[in-house]
Image (cartoon, rainbow, N blue to C red):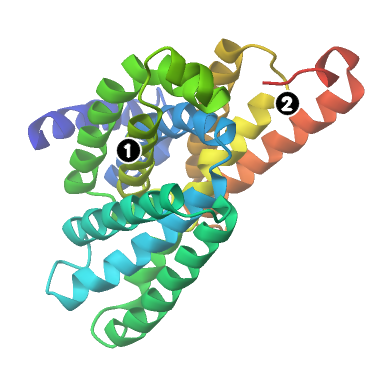
Amino acid sequence: MSAFYELLRQYIINLADQGIIHYTFLYEFVVNGFLCALVVGPLLGGIGTMVVIKRMAFFSQAIGNAALTGVAIGVMIGESYTAPYVSMFSFCILFALLLNFSKNRTKMSSDTLIGVFLSISLAIGATTLLWVSAKVNTHILDTVMFGSILTVNDTDMNVLLVTTLITACVALPLYNQMLLASLNPSLAHVRGINVHLLEYVFVLLVTILTVACVKIVGAVLVEALLLIPAAAARNLNRSIRGFVAWSVIFSTASCLIGIYAPMRWDLPVPSGGAIILTAAMIFVVTMIIRMVMPRYREASI
C-alpha cells in the first residue's frame, strides 16, 4: 500500500507545484491529512447517525478515554509509542465488550453504568500516563488526545483503510436491521432479528473506529465528530436518507475545513480542535435555520 500512497501523494503534490491547487499541498503531511479526512469524514458521519439514534454519545466518549489508557499500557509493555495500535485495540475492545455485557446484565441505567466505566478508565489512564510521561515525549500523548496531521504516516493510513473496509462490509448490509433494533427492539425481535448480537456488533464498530481515528481527530474529540454532524443533520431532516446524507456531508466538510483553515491562515489551533469547532459552527447554523424556518421545526428522526 505504501507504493500506492506514494503515487497518490506525488500526483497531488504535482498539482500544487503547477499552481492548480493551493501551495500547502506541496507538503506530504498535508496530503496525508486530507486523504485521511476524506475517509474519516464519511465514516464517522455515517456511523454517527446511529450513535445519535441509539443515544450512545456518552458511550463513544468512554471509548475515547479508554484509548488513552490503551496508549499508556502499550508504552508500558514496550510497544511503539507512535503507533500503539495493538494495545489500544485490545484494551478498547475488551472495555467495550465488558461495558455492554454489564449493561445487559444489570438493572442500572446506561448513563450510570457508562459513567462508572468512564471513571474507572480515566483513573487507570491517569495513573499509567503519569508513569509513562517520564519515558516518552509528552507531545506524543497530546497528539493522541487531540489529534495532529503532522504525525499521520502510512501505518496510520493502513489502519484507517482496513477499519473502513471492515465497517463498510459489516455496517452497510446490517444498517436497516440495526436501525429497526434501535427504534423498536420488540418489533425487531418479532421479525427474527437478534437485537443483542447487533448491539455487540455496533459497539465493536464504534470502538474500532475510535481507535483508528485518534491520530487525526484525537481520542478526546472522536466522540464530538461522531455526534455533532449527526445532530446538525437531525435538525434539518425528516427522512433517514436525508439524515445520513447530510451527516456525512457535514462531517466531511468539518474534517476538510478543519485541516485546511489553520494552515491556510496560520491559525494557532490544532487540527483536531479546528475540526470540532467547524462542526460546532455548522451545528449552530442548522439550529438557527431550524428556529427561523417553520418547515424545519417539525424535522425529527
Q: Is residue 167 above or below residue 279?
A: above
Q: Are marks 1 and 2 in contact (CB under 8 Å)?
A: no
Q: Is residue 208 above or below residue 66?
A: above
Residue 25 % position (x, y): 36, 37
Q: Quadrant location of residue 280?
A: top right
Residue 222 % position (x, y): 46, 48
Question: Which residue is at 32% across, 32% downward?
Answer: 197
Q: Quadrant location of residue 284?
A: top right
Residue 107 % position (x, y): 53, 53
Residue 9 % position (x, y): 23, 33
Q: Residues within 10 Å of mark 1 (few under 14, many from 20)?
A: many
Q: Amino acid at mark 1?
A: Val
Q: Closest to the observer: 235 or 197?
A: 197
Question: Which residue is at 45% across, 51% downward?
Answer: 103
Q: Closest to the observer: 98 or 14?
A: 98
- The CA distance from mark 1 to mark 2 is 33 Å
Q: Residue 31's mark?
A: 1
State the SS at label 1. helix
Q: Quadrant location of residue 24?
A: top left
Q: Amino acid at mark 2?
A: Asn
Q: Residue 235's mark?
A: 2
Q: Given this view, does label 1 or label 2 mark the residue nearer the observer? A: 2
Residue 252 is left or right of residue 285, and the answer is left
Q: Closest to the observer: 186 or 171?
A: 186
